[in-house]
Amino acid sequence: MLFSKKELNFEVPKVMGIINLTPDSFSDGGKFICPKTLKTDRSKVLKEIEKMENQGAAFIDIGAESTRPNAFQISAAEELDRLMPILDDIKNINAVVSIDSSKGEVISEAIKNGVDFINDINSLKDKKALKLVKDHNLPVCIMHKEKNLSKNSICLEIGNFFKKKVLELSKNGISKEKIILDPGFGYEKTPYENLEIISKFNYTKFENPCLIGISRKGFLKKLSNDPNLDQTSVTTGIISLLNGAKIIRTHNVPLTATTIEKVFG
């Protein structure tokens, strides 16, 4: 699959390292904020990205707005204020760089600075974001985040959403080959539904590659006493990879990458 000018194959699942430029993310909020200026610490971010690349990350996902439950929504201007210190460095990063944003204004600036991939949890509902992705022919990840109000299983509901959304985006000029699918662990789902997705969801039914973001999600606390949930995240994530997912988004790149190497060779 081509990401801007970077091409990846998915014969072996790929690791996506998480960079949160937020003060309030559920796991690592404030990690990259300078305590003196309260601004993004560019040097610290770039060192972390280089470390993740060396540890095996094929993707780096950069986000500047927390999407945890009940998180405070910020303006595009504030999101850009957090991103701008490192946007100019995107073109120098060897890994595929994605921006975790749903706002057209933010996505526009990211594209100007050479971002490879848009990770949009709102699935291009913003019309400006939709047009930008179409005009620049960029890959995009769409995510299921709808409460299951039907009598269907959550796996069936996610599958129906994927089919409907891919068709809708295709009709709006987004190349089907550029779409990545995310089942949305934790978003509007009960703990049981999350566990059902882990154990039963068949990612191989879809032509599009699938991404999973299960790292340090709260429902995993019901499965383990693991203090930071990293081992539990990787173990449950590997199940999804064995079920056909191709990208795993993680806070712990080295543990994830070494486990994938052991399992998939």
Image: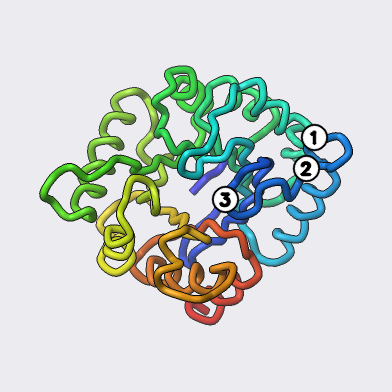
Q: For the view shown, which residue lies furthest in the bottom direction? A: 262
Disc marking residue 33: 2
Where disc 3 sits, the SS reads loop
What's under tag 3, amino acid-wise? Phe
Query: As drawn, is 199 to the left or to the right of 177?
Result: left
Instruction: Tell me what residue is drawn at x 65 percent, y 65 percent.
Output: 56
Q: Compare residues 21 and 92 and report the one nearer the observer.
A: 21
Contact between labelled residues 2 and 1, with CB atoms less than 8 Å apart: yes
Q: Residue 251 got which mark?
A: none
Q: Which residue is mark 1?
A: 39
Q: Amino acid at mark 1?
A: Lys
Whether residue 39 sits left or right of residue 53 in the image: it is right
Q: Secondary structure at mark 1?
A: loop
Q: Residues within 10 Å of mark 1 (few under 14, many from 20)?
A: some
Corner quadrant of residue 171: top left
| Labels 1 and 2: the sequence-earlier one | 2
Q: Position of residue 55 (x, y in %)?
A: 70, 66
Q: Which residue is mark 3?
A: 26
Up/down of 9 relative to 7, above or below = below
Instruction: Measure the C-alpha gap from mark 2 to mark 3.
Output: 15 Å
Residue in view at x 62 percent, y 43 percent: 24
Is the Cβ of the residue at disc 3 closer than 8 Å to that at disc 1? no
